[in-house]
Image (cartoon, coloured by chain):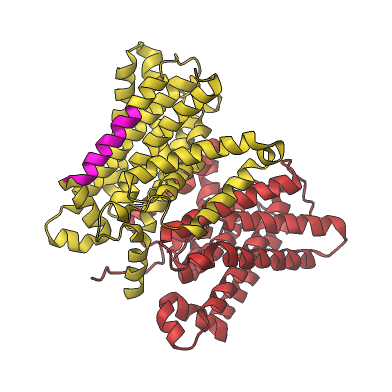
Chain colours: A red, B yellow
């Protein structure tokens, strides 16, 4: 049980990252390899803001989210928009280049050392029977759930959300219907990056560590979570993240912790073999 | 003669050429995006090194055994995963690469995180160069053969290829196995040049670098892959020598260069259209997108 709680915390962070991947993939059919770096940037913004002025947690989170969403939009404008009609692999390489660039930019600006990221309030331990939960784990869970509900409302209840779904379905038709596709893609990047930034702050505080290379592994795993749930599918990303987080924590508890990173990918391999479109993905029939 | 520094650089260039040309066979010709190519190189490198260290076999035999074991893993991975399409295959190969890396990191026989030491130095420039040329010529012949045309047909439209009687699974898996075996040779050369192996040499970043070489050079064209491999081997070193400022921010420029290169010339340095008229070789991704639009 304790492992499940830990897994849920980890999984909800993965889910936040996975949401950004899935949203971008949904509208652009592009694996945004620089997404993990946006997550890292979010963590750094949170760190700098938190250190320079005494702000409540919610404000730090909000500023980090805003900052990373601006980064996401700039990234899209520079590296992806000009390649909208280029071969897909070119956009992929551009994304990889951006990821290398941002990681090294952070190394140059912030230095290679790992920085401590203190939680700006006192963490309390709760005991429920044999379970041990601390207030920060709860905060992570609550924040993630709130953000996900917000995203759900955005996608399903607002005009821009409807436009996003239209663009994801068919870009050209959406354009014919008078939707400003570029604007929708910009908003998608903004929202996805904000979620990644939030995940960066939460994970950075949870492990009390922020460094320029922190984005690589969570970035990959967020992507795995997105594929696991069925890429392009928003509830799927959440499910994939949670499944991945719980499985990873359970796997570490059962096996040796050195195999941790392999567990995520082994699960991925199994899911892909059994149901290639992911847990909640629709089975697209290939049309001629 | 060449200084030790350039000698090493040329050996690395040859190894990179083998990697890029072999990946081009799968990703360029057959259109199957693989993100785990470095894992095959790792398997080849470790197998060759372990074979040499345990039985002291001749170098050629060590290279062959590395190549065979990489090919075996290629078959193992290829058979189930090549049924997957596009991005799913990419992510499956990525996962495979990570699993191999973690396995190398945790197994006894590979020396774990300490790596494998004391491998005799057998690779030299003539051997590396001969292997690179052999792989290039083989790949060139292969793409011009019936086999290569089948791969290109699969890439352009798999359903249509199957309709005209091409056994697409057979061809895709064969291409994958051949490509893995070449990467295994590259791994063997690598192991016997550096004399030390470490799991992080074969991580995801390495696979990505090889893929960048293929795409930068011009996807689908063996000449392009050679060019891409040479450029991406020498440019970072050239940046290192340029000035202390540039050398300090070498990787920063490298990332920026990749992006700028794609923005200016997304089809790569050598466009494959030049070599075979009428085929839109540079449009691999586009096809995928149109398909998605139809669906």
On the rendered structure, is B64 left or right of A72?
left
Toward the top, the furthest residue is: B56
Height in image: A236 above or below A39? below
Residue lying at the far left in this picture: please name it. Answer: B165
Q: Is residue B134 magenta?
A: yes
- Residue at x 22% of width, y 41% of height: B142
Which corner quadrant of the image does residue B133 belong to? top left
Residue A266 seen by the camera? no
Q: A117 or B269, which lies in front? A: B269
- Verify whether residue A181 appears in magenta: no
Locate residue A116, reporting x and y percent. Answer: 77, 46
The quarter of the rendered structure image containing the C terminus of chain B is bottom left
- Of residues B29 and B204, the one drawn nearer to the viewer in this rendering: B29
Q: Name the chief secondary structure element in magenta.
A: helix
Q: Is residue B207 visible?
A: yes
Give the magenta range.
B131-145
Q: Provide residue A32's location: percent of width, then percent of height.
A: 52, 59
- Of residues A271 and A100, the one nearer the viewer is A100
- Image coords of residue A251 (percent x, y): 50, 44
The residue depicted at 41 percent of the width and 42 percent of the height is B227
Q: Is residue A243 left or right of residue A59?
A: left
Residue furthest to the front: B1
The image quadrant of residue A199 is bottom right
- The location of residue A28, given as percent across then percent down, is 47, 68
Looking at the picture, does residue A175 appear above or below residue B24?
Answer: below
Q: What residue do we see at 59% from left, 67% from top?
A: A77
- Is A150 above or below relative to A45? below
- Residue drawn 74% across the image and 68% down it: A62
Q: How many marks?
A: 0
């Amino acid at each position: 049980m304790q492992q499940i709680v830990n897994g849920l915390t980890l999984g909800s962070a993965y889910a936040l990252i996975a949401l950004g991947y899935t949203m971008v993939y949904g509208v652009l059919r592009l694996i945004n390899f620089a997404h993990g770096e946006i997550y890292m940037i979010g963590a750094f913004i949170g760190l700098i803001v938190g250190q320079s002025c005494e702000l409540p947690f919610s404000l730090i989170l909000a500023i980090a989210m805003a900052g990373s969403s601006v980064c996401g939009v700039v990234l899209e404008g520079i590296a992806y928009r000009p390649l909208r009609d280029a071969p897909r692999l070119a956009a992929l390489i551009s994304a990889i280049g951006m990821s290398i660039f941002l990681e090294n930019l952070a190394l140059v600006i912030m230095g290679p050392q790992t920085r401590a990221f203190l939680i700006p309030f006192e963490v309390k331990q709760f005991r429920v029977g044999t379970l041990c939960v601390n207030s920060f784990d709860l905060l992570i869970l609550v924040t993630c759930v709130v953000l996900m509900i917000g995203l759900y409302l955005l996608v399903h209840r607002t005009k821009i959300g409807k436009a996003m779904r239209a663009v994801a379905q068919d870009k050209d038709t959406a354009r014919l219907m008078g939707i400003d596709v570029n604007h929708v893609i910009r908003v998608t990047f903004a929202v996805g990056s904000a979620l990644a930034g939030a995940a960066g702050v939460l994970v950075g505080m949870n492990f009390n560590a922020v460094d320029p290379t922190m984005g690589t592994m969570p970035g990959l795993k967020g992507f795995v979570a997105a594929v696991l749930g069925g890429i392009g599918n928003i509830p799927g990303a959440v499910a994939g993240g949670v499944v991945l987080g719980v499985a990873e924590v359970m796997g570490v508890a059962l096996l040796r912790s050195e195999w941790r990173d392999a567990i995520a990918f082994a699960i991925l391999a199994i899911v892909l073999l059994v149901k290639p479109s992911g847990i909640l993905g629709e089975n697209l029939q290939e049309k001629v | 003669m060449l200084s030790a520094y350039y000698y090493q650089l040329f050996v690395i260039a040859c190894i990179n050429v083998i990697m890029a040309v072999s990946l081009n066979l799968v990703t360029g010709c057959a259109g199957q995006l693989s993100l785990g190519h470095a894992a095959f190189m790792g398997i080849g490198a470790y197998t060759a090194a372990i074979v040499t260290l345990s039985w002291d076999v001749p170098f050629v035999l060590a290279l062959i055994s590395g190549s065979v074991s990489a090919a075996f893993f290629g078959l193992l991975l290829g058979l189930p995963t090549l049924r997957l399409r596009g991005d799913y295959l990419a992510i499956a190969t990525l996962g495979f690469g990570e699993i191999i890396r973690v396995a190398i990191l945790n197994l006894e026989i590979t020396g774990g995180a300490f790596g494998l030491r004391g491998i005799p130095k057998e690779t030299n420039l003539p051997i590396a160069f001969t292997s690179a040329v052999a792989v290039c010529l083989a790949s060139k012949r292969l793409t011009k053969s019936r086999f290569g045309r089948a791969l290109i047909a699969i890439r352009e439209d798999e359903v249509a290829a199957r309709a005209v009687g091409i056994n697409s699974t057979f061809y895709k898996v064969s291409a994958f196995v051949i490509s893995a075996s070449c990467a295994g040779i590259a791994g063997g050369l690598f192991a016997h040049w550096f004399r030390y192996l470490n799991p992080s040499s074969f991580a995801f970043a390495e696979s990505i670098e090889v893929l960048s070489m293929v795409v930068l050079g011009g996807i689908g064209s063996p000449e392009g892959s050679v060019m891409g491999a040479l450029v991406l081997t020498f440019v970072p070193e050239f940046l290192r020598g340029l000035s202390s400022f540039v050398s300090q921010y070498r990787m920063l420029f490298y990332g920026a260069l990749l992006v700028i290169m794609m923005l200016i010339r997304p089809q790569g340095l050598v466009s494959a259209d030049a070599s075979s008229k009428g085929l839109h070789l540079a449009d691999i991704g586009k096809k995928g997108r149109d398909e998605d639009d139809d669906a």
